[in-house]
Amino acid sequence: MSQRDWIEKDFYRELGVSSEATADEIKKSYRKLARELHPDANPGDAKAEARFKAVSEAYGVLSDPAKRKQYDEARRLFAGGGGFPGSGGFGSGGFDVNDLFGRAAQGTGGGGLGDLLGGLFNRRGGASPGSATRPRRGEDVETDVRIDFTEAVQGATVPLRLSSPAACTTCNGSGAKPGTTPHTCATCSGSGLVTRSQGAFAFSEPCRDCRGTGKIIDDPCPECGGDGVSTRTRTLTVRIPSGVDDGQRIRLAGQGEPGRNGGPNGDLFVRVHVNPHSVFGRQGNDLTLTAPMTFPELALGTTLTVPTLDGKVTLKVPAGTSSGRVLRARGKGITKRDGTAGDLLITLEVAVPNNLSSEARKALQAYADVTTDHDPRGDLNALLEGR
Ligand SMILES: [Zn+2]
Ligand SMILES: [Zn+2]
């Protein structure tokens, strides 16, 4: 097997042991898994068979001190190179059996140990012996924020209230009423697993009395009801960069759930929703604006003053400007963080009055009478006459 193949696989994870596990621990874990996953014990179960093969392969490497050393070195080198795409676990402080159970319980696990154990394990931190002290990365958190158009363009600082599950502060996540201690489950002697015999084989399955945790809580914590998890609310101030677009996601590294046992924090992802503006629109980095004009303004020319997001701008409208023409005010659009700025695009549109005073009507009629030689539909009429 190539080194590349090696580092793509987490053999410690396959065997459910830590990377510091002794040869004895590895052997013990392998024997237990091999017994559970043996094809003879799981007839027709392709998942179990695949796991059996993976576990055997992992044991083949980790049981050989020379191979294990090589494997560890390959992994270390790779972890030093900045993590491994698509593979959680490397470089993030090792394997935590609770991760596997957690994923399986959420329905996103790809056939991990949790599936095999029937999803009976809950996600209580530290439920599995030996895992409680391992560093573990905090969960990523996603949230939404709604801001105004102007805030999106100019950047804003917004307070965010986040509610997320966290270890109960009353019982420190143990689920037991403060002052009491959970006692070791007598059924499974604290291992969380019970062994059942069927024919020549012995199976391990999660203990039903303690739900696989190995512990029985006599006095549940009044705050969390024994779950060890409660909802925590925290307020964060988030800086939204200028130029953010509707629907954009901002990543705030390390602002997610806190890591456990010295593990790194998760990230916070904020999805930004932008309220539309009553006047301005947006095309990429350009702002758009429609300016209603009178016919004389376009025909005779004028100077036009329009608002910008932070002031105003005055532009010259030349005589004989068509309705629908777009004027560009350079640099009056959206300024990105890198300093580049878009433009303000002003669409000129003739506004026709609904009602005319008799004086205005007379003046317009006089105008029409002296411009009969101007035919704006010359091309169309030529086409009509050809028919
Ligand atoms: Zn038990
Ligand atoms: Zn509690």
Image (spheres, grey):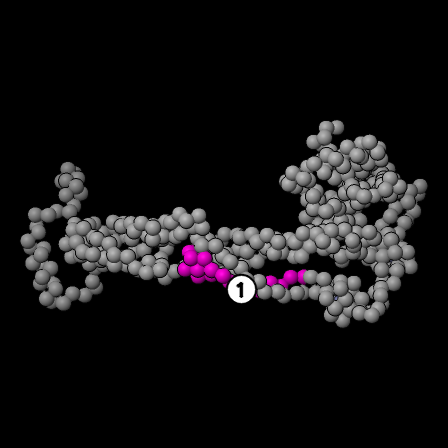
Q: Is residue 60 visible?
A: no
**Residue 184 spot, x, y in % from top left:** 88, 60
**Along the viewing direction, whichever of 74 and 161 lies nearer the viewer:** 74
* Number of numbered labels in the structure image: 1
Instruction: Indicate the quadrant containing the N terminus: top left, top right, bottom left or bottom right.
Output: top right
Report the residue at 10% width, 66% height from top: 359
- The residue positioned 20% from the left and 52% from the top of the image is 317
Q: Is residue 128 visible?
A: yes
Is 151 magenta? The answer is yes
Residue 268: x, y in percent? 59, 55
Query: Picture coordinates of residue 332 (x, y %)?
Result: 34, 53
Q: Which class describes the residues within 10 Å of circle 1: few (<14), some (14-19), or many (20+)?
A: few
| Residue extent of the magenta highlight | 147-165
Seen from this angle, which residue lies furthest right?
A: 200
Q: Is residue 280 magenta?
A: no
The residue labelled by disc 1 is 159
Front in this rendered view, residue 379 or 270: 270
Q: Quadrant of residue 8?
A: top right
Residue under the image location 27 percent in, 50 percent down: 327
Q: Is residue 263 left or right of residue 17?
A: left
Please determine whether, in this image, residue 308 is positioned above or below residue 195: below
Residue 13 or residue 73, whichever sits in front: 73
Give the residue type that dot 1 points to: Pro
Corner quadrant of residue 48: top right
Residue pictured at 44% horizontal, 53% vertical: 243
Question: Going by the image, does 271 lie left or right of 92?
Answer: left
Q: Seen in the image, is 236 located left or right of residue 338?
A: right
x, y (%) of residue 370? 6, 53
Instruction: Answer yes or no: disc 1 within 8 Å of ligand 2.
Output: no
Query: Is disc 1 placed on a helix, strand or loop?
Result: strand
